[in-house]
Amino acid sequence: MLLGITGGIASGKTTVSECLERLGCAVIDADRINNELSAPGGPIWAKIRERFGEEVLLPDGRLDKAKLGKMVFDDPGKRKILEEISHPLIIQEENRRIERIKKESPEKVIVLEATLLIEAGRHGRVDKLIVVTADKEKRIEWLLRERGMGREEAGKRMAAQMPCVEKEKLADYVISNDGTREDLMEKAGKFFREIIKAGSGAPSQ
């Protein structure tokens, strides 16, 4: 079984994925793949350097993600270019990892976590789509505290994504992150037990 987890930025997706991983699922994190492919010399890094130039690189060759982020979230055209560069390469690597897990551990429940799962057209492949939601102000506070963003920048990043209410319409399950981290973990565990009870078969521990 392939589960898709999505939701707005800073909604709590990773916490849900961590809970499911502890319960025996194999988690594929699109953000982590993006980071790996965007490292110096990686395929995304090379294409970004070619398209956006040296100005988006730090002195040590790594991407200046703060500068690149501001650039693309201030300009929808540049954001589209970045997505056209990154999405195909990320999806290719996701597919490779999914097939490897299916071959090596066919009993595993696979979790694909991606903020832009729906926007990238990947939701049609998953067996069940889970959308994690959280209050807008809670998400902004997290971005300010954990990512060091300004309120305006956080707002731009949230506005660039599909509204959560639209994502919920496509969801098989909605998990509301309206309490503590422990509350969210408990909800994720409950969801997992429900889906296993529905007949998917428990993953190996």
Image (spheres, rainbow, N blue to C red):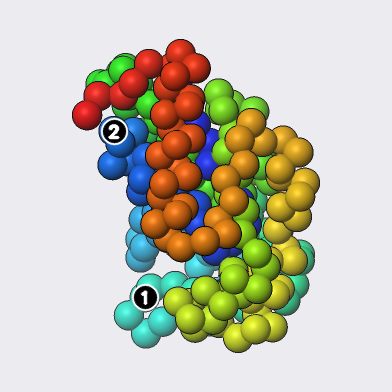
Gap in angstroms between the C-alphas marked 2 and 1: 37 Å
Q: Which of the marked residues, 2 or 1, is nearer the chain's N terminus? A: 2
Classify 204 as above or below 148: above
Residue 27 in sight in this render = no
| Disc 1: CA contacts within 10 A as few (<14), some (14-19) or many (>=20) | some
Which residue sits at x=65%, y=64%? 135
Q: How many marks?
A: 2
Residue placed under numbered mark 1 in the picture: 61
Kindly identify the amino acid type of the residue bearing the numbered disc 1. Gly
In the image, 105 versus 172, the foreground residue is: 172
> Residue 19, position in %: x, y?
36, 45
Q: Give the numbered dot on residue 24.
A: 2
Q: Secondary structure at mark 1?
A: loop
Say which residue appears at 64% left-offset and 31% top-offset: 172
Residue type highlighted by circle 2:
Gly
CA neighbours of label 2 inside 10 A, class few (<14), some (14 to 19), many (20+): some
